[in-house]
Amino acid sequence: AMNQALDRLEQGIRLQREFTADAAHELRTPLAVLRARVETMPDQEAMAKVKADIIVMSHVVDQLLEMAELEGTGVAISGSTDLSAISEDVAALLAQTAIHQGKTLALLGAERLEWVRGNPTMIFRALRNLTENAIRHTPAGTVVELEVKPNGSVSVADSGPGVSDKDRDLIFRRFWRGDRNSGEGTGLGLAIVSRIA
């Protein structure tokens, strides 16, 4: 009876993961079509607003797919990877975002190779999510520092308000956001980071 109950529980969890992945996958195509149609709108101001909404929705869908993938397969460690190179890739990807928001993204310690055991794709995803989060929550005119350390770790530091003691246990929960009224973020980024870590 216990084995049957555990089998039913496992099947339920698997079906939930599959549903999340399928739903996210099915949303990608209509969003791409919508984005193409919006490009033809004559009202440029309205077009810009709709495009911004589509970008947010696409980001949510991508993060749902990432979470479903992580829940379904876990993270395979594929060997050695250069943490400095991954950090450079993340900085290059997000530099424009930081500049657009009036912030600076600084990469420190990446001049030397820093080999670690891990999956480069997953490390990139985790670091990208941490850095995006830092850029989102730091004030304009400040610096987000991405630092590769000689002990095989990397840190992301910003000048934002930080996380209150009461919220520290909550920030890695799926869909949890400290400021639900801001409309920023999906509440999945740090949950993805936690799962990868």
Image (cartoon, rainbow, N blue to C red):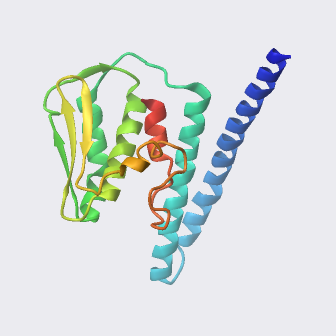
Percent coordinates x, y for residue 80 in the rendering: 33, 17
Residue at figure coordinates x 42%, y 29% from the top left: 197
Q: Residue furthest bottom?
A: 43
Which of these two is toward me, 89 or 68? Answer: 68
| 161 left or right, relative to 37 | left
The relative height of residue 82 versus residue 132 in the rendered view (above or below) is above
- Front-most of residues 10 and 178: 178
| Camera-side residue of 121 and 68 | 68
Residue 30 lies in what quarter of the image? bottom right
Can you tell which quarter of the image residue 110 is in?
top left
Q: Position of residue 84 (x, y in %)?
A: 23, 31
* Count of numbered tags: 0
Placement of the N terminus among the 4 image quadrants:
top right
Q: Is residue 155 left or right of residue 52?
A: left
**The furthest residue to the right:** 1
Q: Position of residue 169 (x, y in %)?
A: 45, 42
For the point 45% across and 67% down, which residue is it? 182
Looking at the image, residue 117 lies above or below residue 91: above
Residue ID at (54%, 25%): 74
